[in-house]
Image: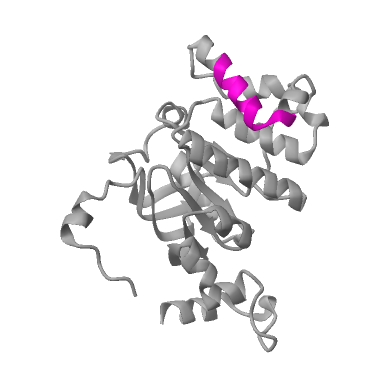
Amino acid sequence: MNAPLPAATAAAAPPPLLDVNGIEVIYHHVILVLKGVSLAVPEGAIVALLGGNGAGKTTTLRAISNLLAGERGEVTKGSIQLRGERIEKLSPAALVERGVVQVMEGRHCFAHLSIEENLLTGAYTRHDKGEVAANLEKVYAYFPRLKTRRGSQAAYTSGGEQQMCAIGRALMANPRMVLLDEPSMGLAPQIVEEVFGIVKDLNDKEKVTFLLAEQNTAMALRYADYGYILESGRVVMDGSAATLAGNEDVKEFYLGMGGAARKNFRDVKSYKRRKRWLA
């Protein structure tokens, strides 16, 4: 176990860019989906939100970006702060203006628009045309494939190109933090590697902070600084990426690296995993 930080060091630690404190989310006034989720995202970090389908990852991102209302969901307890400011009541547009942009699961590119037109929609809150043009060229530098396809309708591009377009569109808002939902979904392994590599470059070179929800635990932990594992709307484990990647339970249940005698993952109930982790 790591020794606690000296008081002076702890006091000097900067507050996180994003601080989520014990939030509960209810859909349709009766369905409790998140049950006291807390997490922190330091500025300049890549933080992974891990867990299987239905664990609550997307709901957590939607709660942060205030996109729950369209699905009749609401945050009923807890708080969400961006640099110390409560943001639960802000509109999605107001959050974009504060630098928080979400790339939704499934890309959601505008099928009838060209790649470049899609990218430019990400700058709809901006009025600095010169800087927007410079940002567009910077996006093309990170995603050269998009520059090649800039005039193509998004509907006729590949899944990987659409994912790059969705991330590029978010970058056109000049964000401080990007909420990235399931970036690997439906993509070939080599494209997943390319997308995650670009995310890492954006973090290193542009200092963009990322909170990414991902079922591909192995890939996420390769690139993240820190991770939270969700099950049934609760955080059941968190730690540095290296700590999680080396944890025997994470290896067994999420990385497929358990011993030969372990049960099939589908036969292991989630409550047994939580009991082992929280014991």
Magenta stretch prevailing secondary structure: helix
Q: Toward which corner of the image does residue 24 lie, by quadrant?
A: bottom left
Decide if residue 28 is in sight here: no
Horizontal side of 11 relative to 239 (left or right) equals left
Horizontal side of 197 relative to 174 (left or right) equals right
Quadrant into which the N terminus falls: bottom left
Decide if residue 195 is in sight here: yes
Up-down relation of residue 84 to residue 93 (above or below): below
Horizontal side of 125 relative to 258 (left or right) equals left
User: Residue 248, position in %: x, y?
Assistant: 54, 78
Quadrant into which the C terminus falls: bottom left
Q: Residue at x 49, y 19 (%)?
A: 125
Up-down relation of residue 208 to residue 184 (above or below): above
- Start and end of the magenta stretch? 133-145
Count of labels in the image: 0
Up-down relation of residue 261 to residue 135 (above or below): below
User: Residue 174, position in %: x, y?
Assistant: 49, 26
Q: Residue at x 59, y 46 (%)?
A: 181
Among all residues in the image, which is located at the extreme bottom? Answer: 261
Front residue of this view, candidates 1 and 184: 1
